[in-house]
Amino acid sequence: MASPPPAPTVLRAVSLDFDDTLIESEAMKRAALVRVASAFDGGEAALGRIDTDSRTGAKVTRHTIFRDFCREVPAAREVGAEALVDRYSQAVREGIATATEVNGASRLLAELRDRGVPTFINSATPTSAVQDAVRARGWDRFVSAALGAPEGGGDKVDNLAEIARRVECSAAEVAHVGDGDNDASAAQRFGCEFFRIGGDGYQDIASLTPALLARLGLPAPATCRICEKNAAPDALPYGGVIWSSPRWLLLHASKPAGVAGHLMLHARRCVVGPVEFNDCEASEFGPVLRRVSDALQAATGAKRIYTCFMSESSPHLHVHLVPRLHDADVTGFDVFQLQARAKSGAVAAATDDACRAVVESVRADLAARPPL
């Protein structure tokens, strides 16, 4: 009788590519290249003759790109390749903080941190630049280190070896996650397991997460109720989304509502609260809360707007904004129990017509004067 196949090695460390694995940044980086090149006559056409995509496995960096660009464009030589690299790097720094994250990225990073899994960013971008990018996203708190292209030469294989050295594990105990052929090649050459994002691999980080945690010997994450609502906001009552932006969703609380106009402001990213905000979220949170509160107060005639978030039932920021009416029978923290009491039948729920009227008023107000 044939012996059963050996169980797969339990993974102990995770290496994650950055661009188009955790954030949708390749298009932004390409636009930054074109913007720098277009400052020169014939620059964009010259850029098309240069190898600019490291994901194919070619040895490409921002330094090789602008070195070759200067060879193609005489006027660029007067500026110098390193000066052009600086222009490009500045444009990328400005774009990284606002680039859309790949679905599930923040939540996976938080899960790995909370479960004690050594996690590393492994990028072909220069080390200082990728570290700046990780800090700008607020992800430095989640990872053991952000490793970029070694200054003395090397690639992602060298970073994988460094990860194994730091964790004191074998190559077979490391997982590398990426979207490019260079990621697949690095994993193969190093001898570790590879998980592809996009193409014929996983659709996004969210779809990868259960499989990766299983290979780490860990149970699947609990379902996030706020993430589920964010994924299908139009299924929520009273017309779904009241206002949205790349980082925020505003909607009415689920039925039955204890108070008409009990609104919920969700962070799109799965972050527990302001302590995990990136710079863009931190700069927008106050202005959004102020403008939404103003619109809600105008719609309801409320004396004030109660605002509360604890992220306890779901560790994903969802801010309650509840109008405190002048003649309210229930005030203070008891207001936040009214929805549960309405669900149990202990108090009458707000009518659908009353809730819908507030939603339509706030939606029109924010459309006329957006929070951002």
Image (spheres, grey):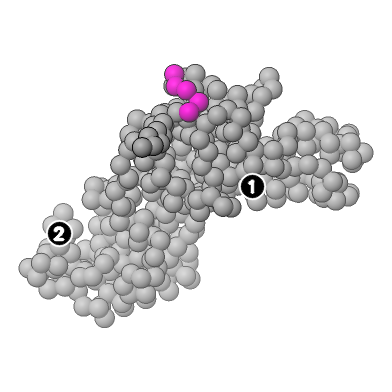
Q: Quadrant of residue 229?
A: bottom left
Query: Outermost residue toward the bottom?
Result: 353
Q: Which segment did they paint magenta?
A: 168-172
Residue name at image x 75 percent, y 48 percent: 35
Q: Quadrant of residue 21?
A: top right
Distance from disc 1 to disc 2, alpha carbons, whole Å, reads 46 Å
Residue name at image x 33 percent, y 50 percent: 317
For disc 2, the marked residue is: 337
- Residue 179: percent from the left, percent from the top? 58, 45
Residue 171 in magenta stretch: yes
Question: Element under label 1?
Answer: helix
Query: Outermost residue toward the left?
Result: 346
- Residue 172: percent from the left, percent from the top? 48, 28
- 30 to the left or right of 320: right
- Residue 163: percent from the left, percent from the top? 50, 24
Three-letter residue code for mark 2: Gln
- Name the image quarter holding the N terminus: top left
Residue name at image x 81 percent, y 46 percent: 47
Please tell me whether mark 1 or mark 2 is closer to you in this view. 1
Question: Element under label 2?
Answer: helix
Q: Main secondary structure of the magenta part?
A: loop
Residue name at image x 31 percent, y 77 percent: 356
- 322 to the left or right of 126: left
Q: Which mark is residue 26?
A: 1
Nearest the eye: 216 or 222: 216
Circles 1 and 2 in contact, beta carbons < 8 Å: no
